[in-house]
Image (cartoon, grey):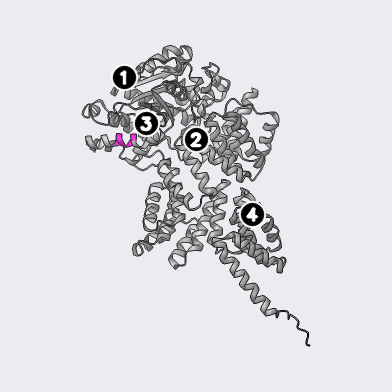
Amino acid sequence: MVNQTTEEPAPEERVGALDVALAHTRRLLAGRPDLAEAQAREILAAVPGHPEALLLLGVALRLKGDLSAAREILTPLAAAQPRAAAVHYETGVTLAALGQARGAIEALSRAVALDPKAPHAWRSLGDQLTQVGDAAGADLAYARQIQASVHDPVLMEAAQALVEGKLAVTEHLLRGFLKSHPTDVVAIRMLAEAGTRLGRYGDVEKLLARCLELAPSFTPARYNYAIVLYRQNRAAEALPQIEALLAEAPRDMGYRNLHAAALGLVGEYAKAVAIYEGVLAEAPEQPLIWLSYGHALRTSGRQAEAIAAYQRAIEQMPGLGEAYFSLSNLKTVRFTAAEAQAMRAQLLRTDLTVEDRFHLHYALGKALEDEGDYPASFDHYAKGAALRRSESLYDPEENAARADRSRQVFTPAFFAARAGWGCDAPDPIFVVGLPRSGSTLIEQILASHSAVEGTMELPDINVIAMGLGHSATSKAPHDYPGNLAALDADQIRALGEDYLQRTRIQRKTGRPLFIDKMPNNFQHVGLIHLILPGAKIIDARRHPMATCFSAFKQHFARGQNFSYDLDELGRYYRDYVALMAHFDQALPGRVHRVFYERMVDDAETEVRALLDYCGLPFEDACLRFYENDRAVRTASSEQVRRPIFRDGLDQWRRYEPWLGPLKQALGPVLETYPAAPVS
């Protein structure tokens, strides 16, 4: 007999079988990552350490949601395969899903350096740079993503110009291209990206809406669209877009974080907190998410948890100035000597961003104020304000001209000719004035009444004014408010109804009245009266030196760009007083004024007068406003959870030696307070 033996397959047969197995594994990844994992493990049992099989195993584990196991496979593989772009990309995506943004950025940066034509890698890098607050880096990454996605020579040239920041060239090329290719969604989205860089959000919004009309499944355009709506404070409109994104990718960290932020803007704080908690449970190494989580907790009145969240952010990112500032902004927190020294050490860094630097200056200013070192405290406040002002487009001359236009348009004759116009719903109570003037206290008092709901500083009046041609920054001539004269009664009523519709999402309790506490709405008193004649308007006023210095040492997340220079602050306050004095003459008795000092001296008398103006019966709860646990989203959130106190009345006097420019700018307004100067 002849002994039969099993022959070993030839080397080329083994290679062929391996290629087939690897290809099969790649196909399984799309729908069955569990089977892909099993297949990859079988390959590795036969060929231990095979690089592609290890990569496929790591991808399969990531797609299954076993992120830690994926990291254990991919991290050493990336070290062993330093030239493999795909390995670095998958490592970066896995680290991003784990919330390890800085490790993800390092891996993704390596991936795009090895393969600059990989749009998915550029997009992931942009997302991670956004997470850590590097807006400029993210813009460049997204531009490179677009560049890597296009092949038409004109679009390639436009994309290169976008990458280089040559926005005028980008616009010129794209507009010419779109004349002959009006439905090219990649070109439309690229033009929108250029518009975003220029701050033309209205144009960008229209471009992205057109993109989605042409290509509803164009996910990058939908994400951009949601962001531009959110940046315009139109969270109610952004939410459906975000929800559509989440329907396709429910675990995407960027979508979830944007969802939470948008929910916060519409007052759904509990839902926002829950999303942040879910994200952080899965990926705890995310300092910027801890920061956002802290903001949501603070607004909800959960101060101890907010402090812990801010401290966690600092542990993970010691140079995160906003986390230190957020602790100082609680007003009731005092920094330890070690924390103050840590802030000083961070300020010595040469790689600190401007944003981190000015936040640290404001926080140190508060720490030194608490210690009684007022010269050093003022020095830090002034440095923070100077940095903030250097990034602002505020123009005091345009602000004065805008106030002058309002005085010219809103005359007694103008209002008399339109008596009975507008939407006569009595629902809104507007609290206007300057920030830090006691408006949050007034809001908290009113929101403690059973018929009144507190919301937040709503952007909707300004959105309506912008639609009519108002701009707070542009130097170009505007028709607002003059163009109101051309509107008929139906159009004016429609504007009032539009406001009520826009703000409906903020109303959660069913109470008949609600508060809009946007202080800057004093600029639009004429518009408010015209479109909402049944609304109440309350002017919160405080001593000009106290108000202005309190604003000067406060960093505002957005807006209030007048507050970072003492001279400009005084001029702004002066313009405000003059405009409100004009409305007192044009609309006698229309605005109810509350002086903070009088509220402190005799709260009950002032509260009764306030409620009487609003047509509300007195309720004792309004005097016990500090027991109200509603969400409060302003710098005074912790202060209004305590009884009225006097210690804030004269804090500015400690800094009087440095406030000469403010006094000079205020001029007669300071001398005649609480009365307005006679014009």
Label 1, secondary structure: give it: loop
Provide residue 589's location: percent of width, then percent of height: 31, 19
Residue at point 43% right, 37% down?
395
Q: Which residue position holds label 2?
A: 269
Looking at numbered disc 4 in the image, what kind of residue is underneath it?
A: Glu
Secondary element type, mark 2: helix
**Residue 498: x %, y % from top left:** 32, 37
Question: In front of the other: label 3 or label 4?
Answer: 4
Give the SS element for disc 4. Answer: helix
Q: Which residue is mark 3?
A: 523
- Residue that numbered label 1 is attached to: 589
Q: Tell me the magenta residue range.
A: 495-500
Left of 646 or right of it: where is 474? left
Residue at numbered disc 4 = 106
Residue at image location 30% in from the left, 28% down from the top:
425
Spatial separation of the CA atoms under disc 1 and disc 4:
62 Å
